[in-house]
Image: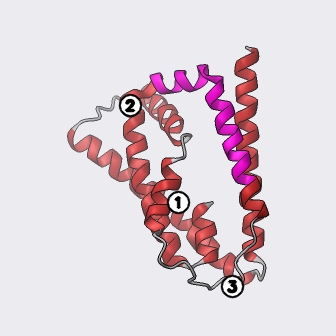
Amino acid sequence: MTVVKTTVDYNRKRGVEVAFAASIVEIFQALIAISFGLVISRYLEANFIIQFILAFAFMALALFVVTRKPRSSLDGEAGNQESFLKRGFLIAALNPQAIPFWIFALATISQYFVFEYVGIYLLSFLIAVFIGKFVALYCFVVASSYLKTHLQEGGQFVNRLLAGILFFIGLSQAWNGISTLLA
């Protein structure tokens, strides 16, 4: 959603910068999943306090996004001195759900294929992770560019959409925390 928001508020180039940085972080998250796998997922499942902290953080972020005013100009380059690569790195690094995704994906893959994460195989896997993430996020950049040119109130629409998604993620984290607590 940060890629969409950045593309709508600034331009396609800035959205691509955020997508590029997020794709690099995805490589490190996949490496963490390979290295720590089940330990991390068991810890997150067993520690309901972290689930509630994540739920609160996503809901607070949703409230912040929905209450802030959209930029007056969708073509604005205001804030151009801001590093969009840095923004992409930060947002992607704060996304802890990518690690359980990779743990699940790698566990599923290992049921069908014997895959050794060493040498050229590991490098190929990480390059594929980067390319897959970047292509997916670039599709969001393209869709955002379309949204920006076809909707007059694109900034406000994106704010509401982003807030709704963040709130939903927060609610699902809270539900997982409550389920863990009651189990």
Left or right, 29 with respect to 152, comes to left
Compared with 96, 149 (above or below) is below
Q: Which of marks 1 and 2 is nearer the N terminus?
A: 2
Mark 2 sits on what residue? 113
Q: Regarding mark 3 in the picture, which secondary structure is present there?
A: loop
Residue 50 on the magenta span: yes
Mark 1 sits on what residue? 136
Q: What is the three-letter code of the residue carrying label 1?
A: Ala
Residue 34 on the magenta span: no
Which residues are the magenta region?
A: 38-62
Among the 4 quarters of the image, the one containing residue 34: top left
Q: What is the three-letter code of the residue carrying label 3?
A: Ser
Q: Position of residue 59 (x, y in %)?
A: 74, 46
Q: Regarding mark 2 in the picture, which secondary structure is present there?
A: loop
Among the 4 quarters of the image, the one containing residue 2: bottom right
Q: Which of marks 1 and 3 is in front?
A: 3
Compared with 25, 53 (above or below) is above
Marks 2 and 3 sit apart, C-alpha to C-alpha, by 51 Å
Q: Which residue is drawn at 53% across and 22% down?
A: 43
Q: Which residue is drawn at 65% across and 26% down?
A: 49
Q: Which of marks 2 and 3 is in front?
A: 3
Mark 3 sits on what residue? 73
Q: Regarding mark 1 in the picture, which secondary structure is present there?
A: helix
Q: Earlier in the sequence, mark 2 or mark 3?
A: 3
